[in-house]
Amino acid sequence: MSLFNVYPLFDITPVSAKDIYVYDDKNVEYLDLYGGHAVISIGHSHPKYVSAISNQVEKLGFYSNAIQNPLQVELADKLEAVSGCKDYQLFLCNSGAEANENALKLVSFHNGKKKVLAFKNSFHGRTSAAVAATDNPKIVAPINAQQKVDFIELGDLDATEAILKQNETCAVIVEFIQGVGGLDQSTTEFYKGLEQLCKQYNTAFIADEVQSGFGRTGDFFAFQKHNITPDIISIAKGMGNGFPVGGILIHPSIKASFGLLGTTFGGNHLACAATLSVLEVLEEEQLMENAKNISEYFQEKAKSLPHLKSIKGRGLMLGLEFDFPISELRKKLIFNHHIFTGSAKNPNLIRILPPLTIQKKHIDVFFEALENELKKK
């Protein structure tokens, strides 16, 4: 049987990884500045992560959500303590798309409305409502397009109010730093205005922290810089350091009832063990502080790059926008210098999403390679 061919693949076959490095089947070492789409938060094969999963699977890997799972309670308490999001409720699932899907479904139950307001260049997932709220018609099938979604420019409060005052919108969903879209972000004034409009027009405010959460921006969540209180916070990617896990944090104003949401695999014992180890390492190794420090170092070094138009993002969720398409440059970084980076919807932008354990010496290697290639242009 052949694989369903939907991924353009680089001819590289990783077989192992350690911290910031990935090793292929020819024993070539790659510097990982992309973390598998921002998934690797505490470094590949972190010993505490490996130990947590190994110990748990020896005892119990999975049982359904029809029984007590104290690990879920422990995770909810630890997440509240580390994130600073007090009194929220936790629902666990398996991915970012599922997190956003459940968030949109839940708020529609809550306020009885059915339209969604999203922003241009957004990416919220590939499932039904999540993909409809993603600004990319190429991945929205006709069955998804039945969802009613308005798209406006990030930063436009007037357009937001014009839509919300129609009283049909169940949710505004926003990435505080757009990931796939190209690391764009707006101002505190806009985000606080958005929060106020949502309250005024009985619309839920969903913060999509799937890529930016779990310390990547230097704060636990990207929205926290702006002193916002979302109704729902969606999480995934870095929370499991590679183990499939996602979830939503739900404000106490939204009430639970039996059967409202459900999942088979969400919040399983292994997922909880993985996420608890991530939270422990984030605290013990002060990785959010490291994200801020390395980000400052990175941005200072980037200022002298030729052909650079702008530096985007925050913490270790960064983008380098050049005055030319970067696809060939990325290939040269991979095959000539053995460095993984990411692309974006913006064809001129390289995305940098490394493990939060990255050090200045790794940044130096990247800039040496980048400068070497840019000299040839």
Image (spheres, rainbow, N blue to C red):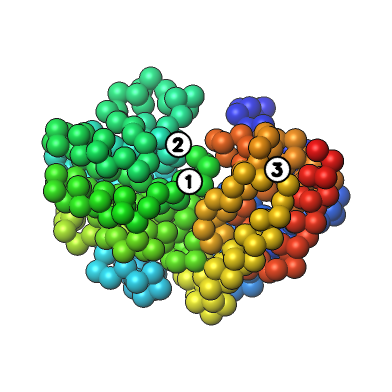
Which quadrant, please, contains the C terminus? top right
Q: Amino acid at mark 2?
A: Asn
Instruction: Tell which residue pokes out farthest to the top in this image.
Output: 142
Crowd band around label 3 with a 10 angstrom C-alpha radius: few (<14), some (14–19), many (20+): few
State whether residue 241 appears in this view. Answer: no
Crowd band around label 2 with a 10 angstrom C-alpha radius: few (<14), some (14–19), many (20+): many
Measure the C-alpha gap from mark 3 to mark 2: 24 Å
User: In the image, what residue occupies the spot 52% across and 70% down?
Assistant: 288
Q: Amino acid at mark 3?
A: His
Q: Residue tagged by mark 3?
A: 307
Q: Residue tagged by mark 1?
A: 184
> Circles 2 and 1: CB distance less than 8 Å?
yes
Residue 112: image location, x then y, percent: 14, 39
User: In the image, what residue occupies the spot 41% across and 61% down?
Assistant: 221
Label 3: element kind: loop
Vertical arrangement, residue 32 with respect to residue 59, above or below: above
State whether residue 292 appears in this view. Answer: yes
Vertical arrangement, residue 92 with respect to residue 162, above or below: below
Nearer the observer, 356 or 70? 356
First in sequence: mark 3 vs mark 2:
2
Residue 34: image location, x then y, percent: 64, 52
Measure the C-alpha gap from mark 1 to mark 3: 19 Å
Q: Amino acid at mark 1?
A: Asp
Q: Residue tagged by mark 2?
A: 121
